[in-house]
Image: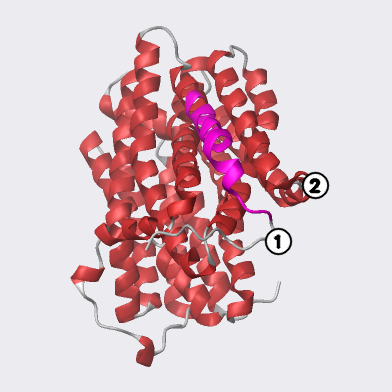
Amino acid sequence: MRFEHRAVPIVLAAVLIDTIGFGIIMPVFPQLITSIGHVDLEQATRIAGYMLVVFAVMQFFAGPVLGNLSDRFGRRPVLIASMLAFGMDYALMAWAPTLAWLFLGRAIAGIAGAVYSPASSVLADVTPPEKRSGVFGLIGAAFGIGFVIGPAIGGLLADFGPRAPFVAAAILALVNAAVMIVAMPETLAPENRRPFKLRDAHVVGAFRPLFHAGNAAPLLAAWFVWQLAHMVYPATWSFWAAIRFDWDAKAIGWSLAFVGLVMALVQGGLTGKIIARVGERRALVIGLVSAGISFLAFAFITQSWQAYALFLVSALSGLIFPAMNGLLSRMVDASHQGALQGGIGSMGSISSILGPLLLTQALATGVDHGFPGAAFLLAGILAFVSLGIILWKVLDRVPPPDAAAAPEIAN
């Protein structure tokens, strides 16, 4: 593949390594928390939920700060600092003697993980406007590949102990930082930089764009509820699989790699064809029904092979995000598309905070009462609530593809 600028593959590698680093530790996280904290899996589930909340909160607040810093000092120093912080963070977690150190590590990772804003800015700096959509899509591809590779590597390295994947993640991040220092050029010209102002680097204004998407409000609500449900996988899978099937880190890693591969194949090869054939409305309904049924089934299965079978069914949930985005783009006029995307990003941050908290506590409470499928039951209910909003409030409001966007926009 030919890139517009030599900074592009370096930035994509940073996103890939970030995702691999996240995925590589997932298979061993239950074992690490139980061994360091001297707790059982039920307690470890609650602790992991709190760690995910710490990560998401720090990322939520750090995102605007890193974005504004990259506008002031350039993309290169911010990205290098983030990669160095990642490397030191994973090394810290590999050494961590207590749970408090793990919480500190998750906080640092949340700050460093707000790297997508400066990474996207690099791509915008060096890519012509007419080609940016395709290049931005490469970030999603890098994320998908990383989520397949990371858990598989983590499961294999688990044979060397629960800390080994953290050492590997630290090495990957530091190597990428070294490559950036040596090879990555600055992409923001000095004349395009602006002063850093703290009043611009906060999250309060992040929700203001939602007031400019009035006609799309029901679909945004459905999107938010679905995002909460979807968090059941990153928040609880490793712990649920260990509790339900007594899987070790290697088995958890392979399961995550399998679901990542299936999702990548479906999204890469089938999603566009299905949406083109049945339309966005039907595709969205199909995706939500598939997700809701899969979540409810996960809540009650007892055999590990059943989980792999359900992965194939749940893969159709890959229709949800592209179908929702397509519908949203037709419900908001051209002058408010940017505001809409800003609001979606803000809600995504909130769902990343609330989702893990709700779902890990549901899993732990369910285990306490002899029902380890409680988190998936809650996720299934949320998925069908999202579907209910779509059927009740959304489908009759969406203009046909060849119509102008709805004019009901809040000012």
Closer to the camera in the image, 232 or 149: 232
Q: Earlier in the sequence, mark 1 or mark 2?
A: 2
Residue 47 position in % (x across, y down): 30, 29
Q: Residue at x 23, y 42 (%)?
A: 101
Circle 1 sits on which residue? 402
State whether residue 9 appears in this view: yes
Alpha carbon of mark 1 to alpha carbon of mark 2: how far?
16 Å
273 to the left or right of 380:
right
Q: Which residue sits at x=52%, y=25%?
A: 380
Quickly name the residue at label 2: 277
Camera-side residue of 226 and 102: 226
Residue 145 in view in this figure: no
Percent x, y of residue 40? 33, 18
Q: The N terminus appears in which quarter of the rendering? A: bottom right
In percent of width and height, residue 76 lies at 40, 76
- Circle 1 — which element? loop
Please tell me whether the stretch drawn in magenta is mainly helix, strand or loop.
helix
What's under tag 2, amino acid-wise? Answer: Arg
State the extent of the magenta-drawn residues as a range. Answer: 381-400
The residue at the point 46 percent across, 64 percent down is: 175
Q: Residues within 10 Å of mark 2 (few under 14, many from 20)?
A: few
Is label 2 in a helix, a strand or a loop?
A: helix
Q: Is residue 367 above or below residue 51?
A: above
| Residue at position x 37%, y 63% in the image | 411
User: Type of residue at label 1?
Assistant: Asp
- Occupied quadrant, residue 283: top right
